Amino acid sequence: MFSILLVLLIIVAIFMIGLILLQKSEGSGMSGSSAASMFGGALTGAAAGNFLTKATAWLATIFFVLCAALALVASRSDTSKYQSELRTELVQQEMASDNVVSEIPVQNESTETK
């Protein structure tokens, strides 16, 4: 479920970025150079601006709903099980590394012969 929502969120974000870049700004941003040439001027009128504004608002709403749904799914997932398994594995690795270190013989200066 989490993966499906995440993929949907990414798709909505990409569409929203595209729609925002197509909108006409005061500086004539990307819409002045590419939108008119790509669509033959179909998205340059007032009706197109109204459509792009409404579509962006809908995509933004869907984006925020998906973000909330992702947060809800993530909070209800059983992460404590995975955290405890990870903690157990880390403790076992730490104990194994301590055993390896303790098996290395240590030479004392007093036992060395000259």
Image (cartoon, rainbow, N blue to C red):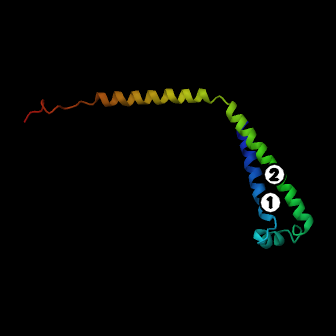
Q: Residue at 78% across / 43% down in the picture?
A: 65
Residue 87: % across, % down? 51, 29
Measuring from the top left, give residue 58's x and y in whole percent.
84, 51
| C-beta proximity under 8 Å, tags 2 and 1 | yes
- Quadrant (top left/top right/bottom left/bottom right) for the N terminus: top right
Q: Secondary structure at mark 1?
A: helix
Instruction: Say few, some or many: other residues with alpha carbon within 10 Å of mark 1 (under 14 / 14 to 19 / 20 or more).
Output: some
Please say if 14 is above or below 40. above
Residue 29 spot, x, y in % from top left: 76, 70
**Residue highlighted by disc 1:** 19
Compute the Cα span from label 2 to label 1: 9 Å
Q: Is residue 68 above or below residue 90?
A: below
Secondary structure under tag 2 reads: helix
Callout 2: few (<14), some (14-19), or many (20+) C-alpha neighbours within 10 Å?
some
Q: Which residue is mark 2?
A: 59
Furthest toward the left, the residue is 114
Q: Is residue 30 left or right of residue 41?
A: left
Among the two numbered marks 2 and 1 on one chain, the one whose residue lies closer to the N terminus = 1
Q: Nearer the viewer, residue 43 or 57?
A: 57
**Which dot marks residue 78?**
none
- In this view, the residue farthest toward the right is 47
Q: Residue at x 79, y 68 (%)?
A: 25
**Amino acid at the residue labelled 2:** Leu
